[in-house]
Structures are given as structure tokens and as C-alpha cells.
Amino acid sequence: MCYPTISPPKMDKTLVWLNCFTNLHVPHHLPSSPTVSSTSPLPPSTTRRALSLSIISFATGFSIPTFSCCPPAYSATSTTDFLDLPNSGGVKALDLRTGSGPVPSEGDQIAIHYYGRLAAKQGWRFDSTYDHKDGSGEPVPFVFTLGSGKVIAGIDKAVRSMKVGGIRRVIIPPSQGYQNTTQEPVPPNFFDRQRLFTTIFNPTRLANGEGSTLGTLLFDIEIVSLRSQ
């Protein structure tokens, strides 16, 4: 079992905890998306090309995967490159690709693709929209209304400063993550949902003072499209 080491002064506890993981893997592709205007309807499916991902390594920091569409600087990035999003309650973000479309506004209907991982399970990927396929085999994005409270606060706050077509990696602290089992997004698989929530809301571990790390989430978020209401 990996335990966080004593951190240097002023180093964020979440980043110290994440740095101790040594076997975190991510899927080997992350599709790209075309820019969709704010007045365009949400597409039922989008043709995508695969982008190569390298394995994330936490041996010396938070190594960012290499995207064929992104600048070389993203190929070796540590946790220190994450920035605190203003007024986000502690959400940290790193833009892997800057979009060229519009920025969401309150009440907009947003379609996103994501990879969701749980820090307390050594980076276990509990869900991915790229695995949710429609009848033609295309991945189905997750759709929600910005500001509706449907999704966990960390995702709602993370997408507000993104542009359509952008990809952002975020570290979401427990306070901005799952507060109950009704919040989305959730894995469609029953056993994955159970594993996710029994970990985050484990009463024994919460009583042992692990609440500050149990619900820490890592999301890769891509805004596919948005529609103004």
C-alpha cells in the first residue's frame, strides 16, 4: 500500500498523495472532436480519430500523456504544472488542448467526453464515455445543463472556462466531487458504481480521517459541443 510522504512546505496535500501512485494506466486513445457552434444541435455521434496516449507515471510526478495534436511540452508535465481554477473550491486543471469554439454559459446544454479515475484506487478508471456506444458503434457523449446541479461541482466548474474542442485534465478534491450517490456522471455498470461509492463513502476509512483523499477524482474532459438555451 502506498502512503503519502511528508510534503515540503506549501506543497498541496492532494498532489503529494497522487505522486505516490506508481502503476496508474489510462486508455491508449483519446478521440479528437470538431468544433461545433453554440447554435448547432448536439450530434448523436461524431466520427473521431484516435490519439495516442502514453502511460501516466507517478514515480517522480504527474506525467501527462503525449497527444499527437498537442505541443511537445505536454509529454512530460508534473503536478506542479496544474493551476488552481478560480472560484472552484480547489479544482486543479491542466489544458491538454485548447479549443477553438465558444465558451459555455450558464444554462447551456453541454456534451462532453470524459475519462474518470479515482485516486483512492490507484487511479482506477471507473468510467469512460468512449466506452458508451450507440447502435452504430460510435461513442455517446454525456450531456448536461451547465449550472443545473446534475453533475458533480468539479466538472461543472471545470468546463466553464473551456472552449468547445478543448481537452482539460482536472484534479477534483472530495469537496467538489461526489457528495451523494445521485450525482452524475456515474458508471452504467452496477458493480463499478458499487465499487466507486463504497470507496468514497467507506465509513471506516472516513472515521480514520481519510475523507480528504478518498473522494479525490481525476477527469480528462473534452467538450464535444454545446447548445445555448
Image (tube, rainbow, N blue to C red):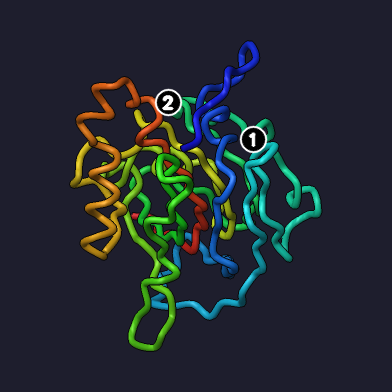
Numbered label attached to residue 164: none
Residue 89 is tagged as 2
Amino acid under disc 2? Gly
Residue at (78% x, 54% y) in the render: 71
- Give the x, y percent position of residue 148: 27, 44
Q: Nearer the viewer, residue 27 or 177?
A: 27
The quadrant holding residue 93 is top right
Task: State left or right for residue 49 relative to residue 126.
Answer: right
Quadrant of image for the C terminus: bottom left
Q: Quadrant of residue 81?
A: top right
User: How many residues crowd around disc 2 within 10 Å: few (fewer than 14), some, or many (20 or more)?
Assistant: some
Residue 47, how many percent across, how many down? 53, 80
- Labels 2, 1: front one: 1
Q: Amino acid at mark 1?
A: Thr
The front one of 36 and 196 is 196
Position above or below: 15 against 99: above
Residue identified by numbered label 1: 79
Number of numbered discs on residues: 2
Q: Is residue 90 above or below residue 219?
A: above
Q: Position of residue 170 (x, y in %)?
A: 52, 42
Marks 2 and 1, the one that precedes in the sequence = 1
Where residue 133 sits: x, y (%)?
37, 78
Callout 1: helix, strand or loop?
helix
From the viewer's perspective, is 42 left or right of 98? left
Q: For mark 1, does the 10 Å Cα neighbourhood hold few (<14), some (14 to 19), or many (20 or more) residues?
A: many
> Residue at horizontal 53%, vertical 41%?
161
Residue at disc 2, secondary structure:
loop
Residue 68's place in the image compared with 155, above or below, is below
